[in-house]
Amino acid sequence: MPMPHRLSALLLLSLSPWVHAADVAHITLDNGAKVRLKDDFTWEYVLTDAQASVSSPVTEAASTPPLPRLSASAMANSALIRATAKDGIKVNVANSQWNQDQLGLQFELASTSGEHVTSVVLEARFFADNGSLLKTEKLKIWQAIARMPETYLRKGEQRQSRILWVDGIDKAQWQQQLIAISITEIESR
């Protein structure tokens, strides 16, 4: 007897690798940092707390999603949010500089991956000194040149990115340099 279409679609969806991992537990480390354990054997730092948005009409406030706010433990351990790793690629913020109203960021990359990495893209979330989210931006921090293997990031190598310029960050609100990064894409050969 054939399986009903709805049941087969549900079964296929539940076996799909693109389904997001569910939280298993939340743990507070000895240093005060909070960690979220997931059912796919990965973990991540809990960086933000939801903050209700300020709005006068009740109907508008109900439809506005809460704004992310950097948690107190993330602010106290800001070095942890300035680094990330995925699939054998580790990235941290190496330097920052200002050119008038533009923020320049340089990243340090290290590889333990067996793949030859040709591209790395980050999501960078910039937080004001009070912990409120200023801006989220995708940054391509590494791009090798096609057919030039010496430009690939290889196992055991450590390299620095070029300086990437970001607009829209208020220098007066970003004195603590609170930036949370996470790798969103890695391409390799």
Image (cartoon, helix red, strand yellow):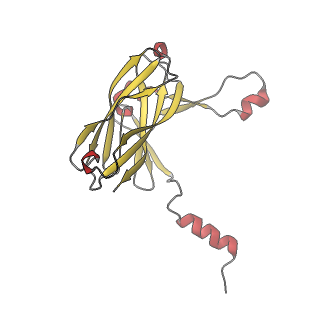
The quarter of the rendered structure image containing the N terminus is bottom right
Compared to residue 111, the image places residue 13 above or below, namely below
Measured as percent of width and height from the top left, residue 22 is found at: 51, 52
Compared to residue 104, the image places residue 123 above or below, namely below
Measured as percent of width and height from the top left, residue 173 is found at: 48, 16
Q: Nearer the viewer, residue 147 or 117?
A: 147
Measured as percent of width and height from the top left, residue 98 is found at: 40, 17
Name the outermost residue toward the bottom: 1
At 53% from the left edge and 27% from the top edge, which residue is drawn?
Answer: 133
Q: Nearer the viewer, residue 22 or 167?
A: 167
- Relative side of 127 to 119, left or right: right
The quarter of the rendered structure image containing the C terminus is bottom left
Name the outermost residue toward the left: 156
Q: Nearer the viewer, residue 31 or 64?
A: 64
At 49% from the left edge and 61% from the top edge, which residue is drawn?
Answer: 17
- Relative side of 66 to 165, left or right: right
Residue 16 appears in the figure: yes
Res 95 → quadrant: top left
Res 4 → quadrant: bottom right
Count of number-bearing discs:
0
Res 41 → quadrant: bottom left
Residue 45 appears in the figure: no
At 42% from the left edge and 35% from the top edge, which residue is drawn?
Answer: 181
